[in-house]
């Protein structure tokens, strides 16, 4: 089930200009399962794409913005082959996201693809939940797909970027 959601996400990734996608809906509506299954399907169908997924609901460390930024930076470093060293205050990682996303986009374009960042459950963020620290624009060659529960976090995140919103509701038997 959920074919229409897969098609909507596929279309958003290939659209120009590319907009970040915010998958929204009620708790238990299948947002996390959708993102996990879509990411796997898209990566299989598009081997030129570089997919990096981060699920914030997997624990407190995964939901802390600094820890998340450090993980993303390390993964981008591993993917691109560029050395990443974080010296001093770990909070510097947040400021490094934008230039490293730029590097990821350049790397992906050189490989003929796109760098896709999937962030599940933004509403689980433990600090700076309004994403005031997140880059305001995505570099060329970078796509963002995120999910969030309906409510306050969604409402504060939407104005930060020009999101394409995808509303998800629980699948019905007829959808399967």
Image (tube, grey):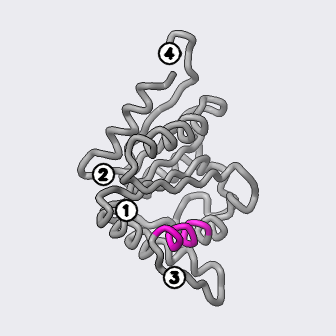
Alpha-carbon distance for marks 4 and 2?
A: 28 Å
Q: Kindly indicate whether the residue at mark 2 contacts the one at mark 1 (C-beta within 8 angstroms).
A: yes
Alpha-carbon distance for marks 1 and 4?
A: 33 Å
Residue 74 as seen in the image, left or right of residue 82: right
Alpha-carbon distance for marks 4 and 3?
A: 46 Å
Q: Nearer the viewer, mark 1 or mark 4?
A: 4
- The residue to which callout 2 is attached is 18
- The residue to which callout 3 is attached is 83
Q: Residue at x 47, y 75 (%)?
A: 81
Q: Nearer the viewer, mark 1 or mark 3?
A: 3
Quarter of the image holding residue 74? bottom right
- How crowded pointer 4 is (Cα within 10 Å; few <14, some 14-19, many 20+) is rated as few
Q: Residue furthest top?
A: 174
- The residue to which callout 1 is attached is 138
Q: Nearer the N terminus, badge 1 or badge 4?
A: 1
User: Over which residues does the magenta segment extend?
Assistant: 71-79
Foreground residue among 139 and 141: 141
Residue 175, numbered label: 4
Q: Residue at x 33, y 69 (%)?
A: 106
């Amino acid at each position: 089930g959920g074919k229409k959601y897969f098609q909507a996400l596929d279309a958003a990734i290939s659209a120009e200009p590319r907009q970040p996608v915010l998958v929204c809906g009620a708790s238990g509506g299948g947002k996390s399962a959708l993102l996990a299954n879509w990411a796997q399907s898209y990566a299989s169908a598009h081997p030129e794409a570089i997919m990096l997924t981060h699920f914030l609901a997997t624990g407190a460390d995964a939901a802390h913005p600094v820890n998340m930024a450090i993980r993303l930076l390390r993964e981008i470093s591993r993917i691109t082959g560029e050395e990443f060293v974080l010296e001093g205050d770990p909070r510097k990682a947040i400021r490094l996201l934008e230039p490293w996303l730029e590097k990821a986009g350049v790397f992906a374009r050189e490989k003929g693809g796109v760098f896709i960042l999937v962030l599940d459950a933004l509403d689980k963020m433990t600090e700076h939940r309004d994403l005031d620290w997140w880059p305001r624009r995505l570099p060329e060659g970078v796509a963002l797909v995120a999910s969030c529960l309906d409510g306050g976090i969604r409402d504060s995140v939407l104005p930060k970027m020009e999101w394409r919103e995808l509303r998800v509701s629980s699948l019905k038997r007829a959808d399967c």
